[in-house]
């Protein structure tokens, strides 16, 4: 499976936000993340970097 | 491998922009995409939707 873990960058540290992420899409000025279990998170953040081979999504707060 | 294909949404159609994408990161007001072969594309676009389980990245032009 090719889902990835989403981390939020805070003070230079990566905090795990949601694992096994499938969908990411803008939702107003936020991003909506949905994982393979249907769990959702909506967060005011931008994409900092995606690294798909390493299954890693890094977001930063707006 | 968990890279994905990046498509650009144009007039409701999805045009293949770059296959086997590994990295996506902002580059000024553009996005920089790098695939597993080191091929790069920089495009003035936003993320419309990521669907990682389906290996699909959909971008829309700014």
Image: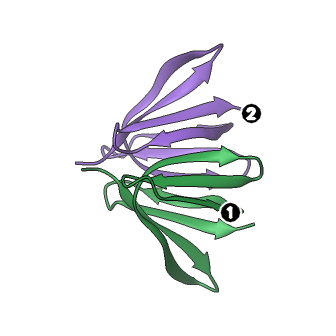
Chain colours: A green, B purple
Q: What element carries label 1?
A: strand
Chain identifier of the residue bearing label 1 in the image:
A
Q: Mark 2 points at which residue?
A: B62
Picture residue at 49% right of the left edge, 52% below the top = A34
Q: Do labels 2 and 1 share a chain?
A: no
Mark 2 to mark 1 CA distance (whole Å): 18 Å
How would you rate the neighbour count of disc 1 (Cα within 10 Å): few for under 14, some for 14-19, many for 20 or more? some
Picture residue at 24% right of the left edge, 50% below the top = A1
Residue A13, percent across and down? 54, 85
Nearest the eye: B18 or A27: A27
Question: B14 left or right of B62?
Answer: left
Image position of A32 with respect to B56: above or below: below
Nearest the eye: B30 or B46: B46
Q: Are marks 2 and 1 in contact (CB under 8 Å)?
A: no
Picture residue at 28% right of the left edge, 48% below the top = B2
In the rendered image, the quadrant that contains the C terminus of chain B is top right
Chain identifier of the residue bearing label 2 in the image:
B
Q: Name the residue under label 1.
A: A45
Q: Is mark 2 on a helix, strand or loop?
A: loop
Image position of B41 with respect to A47: above or below: above
Q: Residue B28 carries which label?
A: none
Residue B15, percent across and down? 50, 19
Residue B57, percent across and down? 47, 37
């Amino acid at each position: 499976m090719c889902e990835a873990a989403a981390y939020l960058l805070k003070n230079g540290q990566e905090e795990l936000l949601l694992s096994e992420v499938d969908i990411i899409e803008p939702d107003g000025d936020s991003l909506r993340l949905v994982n393979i279990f249907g769990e959702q998170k909506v967060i005011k953040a931008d994409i900092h970097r995606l690294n798909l081979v390493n299954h890693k999504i890094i977001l930063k707060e707006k």
